[in-house]
Amino acid sequence: MTLFVNHLTHIDASVWSPTHGLMGASWHVDAELDGELGPDGMLFDFGEVKPWIKARLDSGLDHTLLVPTQAPGLQVFDCAEGLCLRTQLPYHMELRGPRQSFTLLPWSDITVADVAAHLSTELSRRPPAQVETIRLRLREEEIETAAYSYSHGLKHHAGNCQRIAHGHRSRLHIWRDGRRAPELERQWAQALDASYLIHEEDLAPQADECRETLSVAYSADQGRFHLTLPRERCHLLATPTTIEHIAAWLADKIARETHGRIRVQAFEGIDKGAIAESS
Ligand SMILES: Nc1nc2c(c(=O)[nH]1)N=C([C@H](O)[C@H](O)COP(=O)(O)OP(=O)(O)OP(=O)(O)O)CN2
């Protein structure tokens, strides 16, 4: 017998791509479970499927940086913070942080299908009673309008959002003077895509010769984090990079640039976010 649960949860993470660099990702999770029915006529109570799978994803790959350890020019080694990742292609990046903020995968690139297969194997190792196999399907949200991916870290977050390189793929809705503005949406989604958002207060001192990079450093409950990446990939905010502040920052910037009354609905991954207005 096979049981299925669609839209079981979401995964939000960042992915290191040897062609695109640091990318935010958000995936819907659908699940199928194979096994034998118990005396109650069920394979596994629907009420328990979701918390069982979600708990394992939340304590595993969710909100980590997915690293393809066989990618060209990539090094991973132990360091005082836990693990250090150094990359060369498509740009130089160095990230140091606690081990649990990385998911190391022995591949040359990360694909959604391979991540789903990897999670399915992991979950099937110790399945609940009566369940023999668990298959996950990961899907990007279908977005016909503007979308962008970004990465960030929230040092004050009590949970895994404190990890310095976790990210999202998000819709962006903008209204100018009460009307949806698809051209502004495309323009801003393009400007933000594949970016890293920084709270200015987290900028770390750098040597004068490092004009082309920015470094971010902070300590949080899970440990110390340090990230250096190209300046051109970064946007600086005067506030923490919560979605409330991102929406307000965008609304202010766009209102100043267009001299219009601007409303921004900024999503953080799938189906949630914040709305801000500025004129
Ligand atoms: N009000 C806000 N709450 C949270 C924000 C925020 O900007 N404003 N941000 C975060 C993190 O950035 C996080 O990445 C969001 O991930 P989320 O999926 O919400 O985290 P959970 O795993 O806790 O939620 P589930 O959807 O149940 O998996 C957190 N909060």
Image: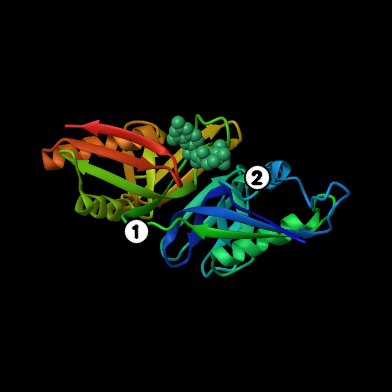
Residue visible at 35% across and 31% down in the picture: 239
Screen quadrant of the C terminus: top left
Residue visible at 43% across and 67% down in the picture: 19
| Camera-nearest residue between 144 and 228 | 144
Residue 273 x/y as whole percent: 40, 38
Mark with earlier residue (2, 1): 2
Residue 99 x/y as whole percent: 64, 46
From the viewer's perspective, tell me whether residue 173 is left or right of residue 23. left
Mark 1 vs ligand 1: CB below 8 Å: no
From the viewer's perspective, tell me whether residue 145 is left or right of residue 37. left
Residue 5 x/y as whole percent: 64, 52
Q: Look at mark 2 in the image and give the residue it sits on.
A: 54
Residue sitting at the far right:
39
Please tell me whether residue 238 is drawn above or below residue 170 in the rendered image: above
Residue 56 at least partly seen: yes
Q: Look at mark 1 in the image and give the residue it sits on.
A: 144
- Pointer 2: residues within 10 angstroms few (<14), some, or many (20+)? some
The amino acid sitting under disc 2 is: Lys
The amino acid sitting under disc 1 is: Glu
Mark 2 vs ligand 1: CB below 8 Å: yes
Q: Where, by quadrant of the figure, is residue 22 drawn?
A: bottom left
Residue 135 x/y as whole percent: 68, 61
- Pointer 1: residues within 10 angstroms few (<14), some, or many (20+)? few
From the viewer's perspective, tell me whether residue 192 is left or right of residue 270. left
Q: Distance between the residues labelled 2 and 1?
A: 28 Å
Residue visible at 60% across and 36% down in the picture: 223
Q: Where, by quadrant of the figure, is residue 254 drawn?
A: top left
Residue 208 at least partly seen: no
